[in-house]
Image (spheres, helix red, strand yellow):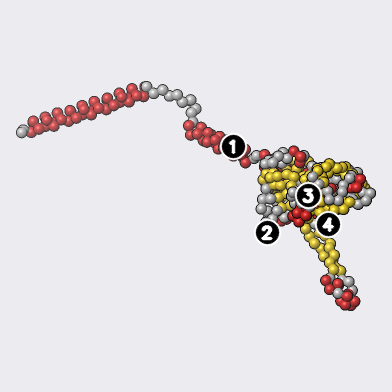
Amino acid sequence: MSQFKIAFISSLITVLCVSIAFAYFYTRNENLNISTENITDTRPINFQPEKETENNDAEKREKISEDLFESRSNIITRTVKNISEAVVGINVKEIRQYRDPMSTNPFWRQFFGDRVYNREVSGLGSGVIISSDGYIITNDHVAGRADKIIITMTNGEHYDAKIVGTDLVSDVCLLKIEAKNLPHVKLGDSDEILIGEWAIALGNPFGLFDINDKPTVTVGVISSVGMNLGENSGRYYLDMIQTDAAINSGNSGGPLVNSFGELIGMNTLIFTAQGSSGSVGVGFAIPINKVKRIIEELKSNGKVDRSFVTGLRGQTIDEGIANYYQLPSASGVIITYVQKESPSEDAGLEEGDIILSVDKYRITNFETLVAVINEFRPGDKVKLKIQRGDSIIDKTLKLEKR
């Protein structure tokens, strides 16, 4: 092939390639122009997508925080916040006298005499302020025999307290500190307690109050009411409130409140399984309605007046007595003695009568009978239901002042 033909063909191919390329880019540009013309921009003039996203995220986080806080802040936490400042820690010191055991030996006593020495014993418990002018309630077994009582407030302040009055039988003690405008709890109505309602116990278990001047809190429910627990060291526990809110050593005298922040009981006892020393979910509190009556008497007289006589003696009916008298059950108290010219004789009671109930209380043993009678005062009239033979008889016993 000649050089001219080769040059011609090469030129033709070059022109063809350029034409194809031109046509391709021209068509693509037309398509792009069409696509761009059909797009409508709906964004505002000052549209800032990244900033708006950040604001939305912040609002969501704030809403989540508010919801979380609301779920944490409930009726229990609000109640605790409202009443905590009225709870106090109590530290006591008592001087006890001890006799040297060797002093009982006449030979030893002849040379060394009757040796008696004093020992200071410390104790602790809880209390709750019930008035703005400084009245505090606690248990008799916490402060009733103390020689020195120190009250610790939630603000860290300390006060010396004096005993206004104390009652061994009911285990209630009324204290007073010299202060004004104090936070205090509202006294509730223990007759309105509902089984299963929330119960909040506050206090000073194991002296933990002294670490940061704040009471500790446990929460449970009202498990039962009207529990009669008998006698312990001269104290009679009648009509007690049972709760599963944990109560430990040092909680005695502290408040048991409902979800309204009303004082419904005073923490007093725990049931401890054999070999255990801590709470097992069975705690007991004195009903506040009973405490109200006691503290009014302590304010007025410094003591509770139980100087009355009944003129009877009795014995718990056990299996032996039940079999001897051919009784249907081993329950109740049998009257073993009626004093002449006594209130019991005046009421028509006789030896051999079986006391089944006193007022609203069912009598199962002699301890319960004593506890119930101690609820009354001189001059009160007490209704008794007794069994005499096959008959059930109602009697009224008037308690005469001794």
Give the residue pinned by disc 4: 146
**Spatial CA span between label 4 and label 2:** 29 Å
Query: Counting residues from the N terminus, which is met first, the one under dot 4 or under dot 2?
Result: 4
Residue 47: x and y in percent read 48, 28
Q: Which residue is mark 2?
A: 274
Q: Is residue 205 found left or right of 110 in the rendered image? A: left
Q: Residue at x 77, y 45 (%)?
A: 362
Q: Dot 4, crowdedness within 10 Å: few (<14), some or many (≥20)? A: many
Q: Which picture quadrant has residue 225?
A: top right
Query: In percent of the image, x 87 and y 47: which residue is there?
Result: 349
Residue type (three-letter) at the residue carrying disc 4? Ala
Of the image marks 3 and 4, the number of the one nearer the N terminus: 4
Say above or below: 274 vs 260. Answer: below
Q: Nearer the viewer, mark 4 or mark 2?
A: 2
| 61 or 49, nearer to the observer | 61
- What residue does disc 3 label? 332
Q: Is residue 286 visible?
A: no
Is residue 57 positioned above or below 212 on the image? above
